[in-house]
Structures are given as C-alpha cells and as structure tokens.
Image (tube, rainbow, N blue to C red):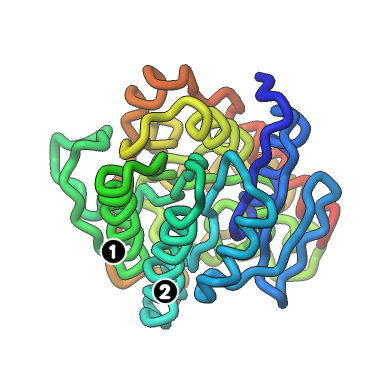
Amino acid sequence: MVYGMKKALIIGAAGFVGNYLIDHLAVDCGMEVYATKLPHEELGNQNARIYDLDILQKQNIIDILFEIRPEYIFHLAAQSSVGVAWKNPALTIDVNIKGSVNVMDAVRELFYKPRLLLIGSGEEYGHIKDGETPISEENSLRPGNIYAATKVCQNMIGSIYARAYDMEVMMVRAFNHIGPGQAPIFVVSDFCKQVVEIEKGIREPVMYVGNLKAMRDFTDVRDVVRAYGLLIEKGSAGETYNVGCGKALAIQAILDLIISKSKAQIKVEIDPNKIRPVDVPIIEADIIKIRDAVHWEPIIPLEQTIQETLDYWRDRV
C-alpha cells in the first residue's frame, strides 16, 4: 500500500491507538506523519513530528492545519473511558462533542479539502435487541452510557458536515481493540497485568474481575489502524463503517485463555467496583460494509494478541 508522500495528521495521538497508527502510516504506508498530544502527555515516537494541541482551543487547530496542510486527518482525541464518563460527564461532553466540532470547523475553514476520519465506538449501538446481532451500521442507536451518547452525537454531526458543507468526512465505529501497551483500565490489559503480578508474587493469587458474561468483539489494535489507513484513502464521504472482528466472545472465555497461558495457580473473584451501572450483554460487529468498501478484515489471531500483551506486562512489571 503506497500513497506517495501524503501528509497525515493524527489529532490525539498520545493514547493507545496513536502510536500504532503513527507507525502504520509512516512505515507501512510511507506517509509524512504529524501528531498532536496534550501538553502534559508523553509521546515519544520518532516516526512523527509532534505538536501540543488542546482541541478545545479552535484557533490552535486552525494554526496547525495551516502550517502542515495535511491530506489526511485522523481525529482520535477523545475522553474514551466509559468509567471516567460516568464520573465526569461534563468533561466527556466537552472533549468528545465540542472538541470534535472544533476540528470539523477548523477543517471547513481550509482552502482545500483534506479527508477526515472521525473515530467513534461500537458502544454507540447501546442496548442491542434480540435478532440484531451481528450489528450493522444501519441499526438503531440506543446509547446506554454518557461516553456512547457523545460518540453518537459526533457521528451525527460528522455526517451533517459531510453533506451540508461537501466535506470529505468519514466515520468509524470501532469495537473493542486490544494489544500490547493498552492501559490496564481496559479489560484484556487489566487481566494480563493481574496475571503477571501474580506470576511475580506481587499480588495474592486472586484475580478480581467484573461481569464475565458480557460478550464483546475484540480486534488487535494493529488490524484496527490498518482499517483506518484504508478508510481514509478509500472510504466514502458521509459514511460510517464498523471496525471489529465480527465475532463476539464472552469475557469469561478471554479470561480462561489468559489464565491458560500462565503457570500460576489463580483464583477468580468478582469485584463489585468493576461492574458497570449499565452493561450491554452482547456487542458484535457486522463488518460486511468495510470489507466490501476497502477489502479489510482482521488477520491477527486473538491468541497472538493475548500472548504479546502478557509478554508486554512481563517485560514491565
């Protein structure tokens, strides 16, 4: 996949996905990559030129866009923790709605038309009814938490901007992505870190977990960023694409697989603090649309992702 030396700007690159996206665009796609982070965040990736940016300051976005003039813009900046959204709804709304509108508006003021990918979430579908799984992009949206509601709003505004202002805006609904380097507030990384701490004798041989019956669609982050790269080049303006593996697994099955890769004797207990106020029983993506549009599907097996995530923690704990 060669694009020529196109310029790509990743807004909000200090998170888990940002580093992987920088590497994919720079190394695999041969792009000139620019990335932004908040002033207090760390981002030490040699494959990108790094800028400080707060997306709540619209003029700062405009200044960076005029300086770089990117062909492709990936909008990753978000308050993306469901748990944090329950505790701090106002911050989540500011960053995820006002911030993304600032980005779209700044792009609208340019004298040319870059392609903009807005990153949303499988959480947008919310309560999924019987018979709706796997869930397609046309399904009703019934967000069950504040984070999901802000992402639904971003998606709707993005599609309006695409139509009303004739902008090249594409939207993604990304389902759970996992891999080495993910923060342990997310379930797979949390489980892997706990297992490693038990292996090293740092914690008692008991794992504390939330709802193990919930079924989720997990995709390796490296497959996810490959989808983003394909969509920004070949996706259709105004369209939304699911990015997931297309197969839901119970959290219990993930936990069993992680524990099976450890020699430690481990007991499992439910931690009431890890149970969410509202939890959707099953989330599984229908990925026919993205497969047809850009010929993408995930290729990294779950077992490999889990092994590499365990090894990541074994190197760091």
Mark 1 touching mark 2, by CB under 8 A?
A: no
Q: Which residue is mark 2?
A: 92
User: How many discs mark residues in the rendered view?
Assistant: 2
- The amino acid type of the residue labelled 1 equals Ala
Tell me which corner region of the image, top left, top right, bottom left or bottom right, holds residue 198: bottom right
Residue 246 in picture, x, y percent from top left: 39, 30
Which residue occupies 59% across, 39% down? 71
Residue 170 in picture, x, y percent from top left: 40, 40
Q: Which residue is mark 1?
A: 149
Residue closest to the far front: 111
Q: Is residue 196 left or right of residue 15?
A: right
- The amino acid type of the residue labelled 2 equals Thr
Which residue occupies 59% across, 27% down? 301
Q: Check disc 2 and report its element: helix, strand or loop.
A: helix
The residue closer to the viewer here, 309 or 90, is 90
Cα gap from disc 1 to disc 2, whole angstroms: 10 Å
Residue 61 in picture, x, y percent from top left: 57, 65
Q: Check disc 1 and report its element: helix, strand or loop.
A: helix
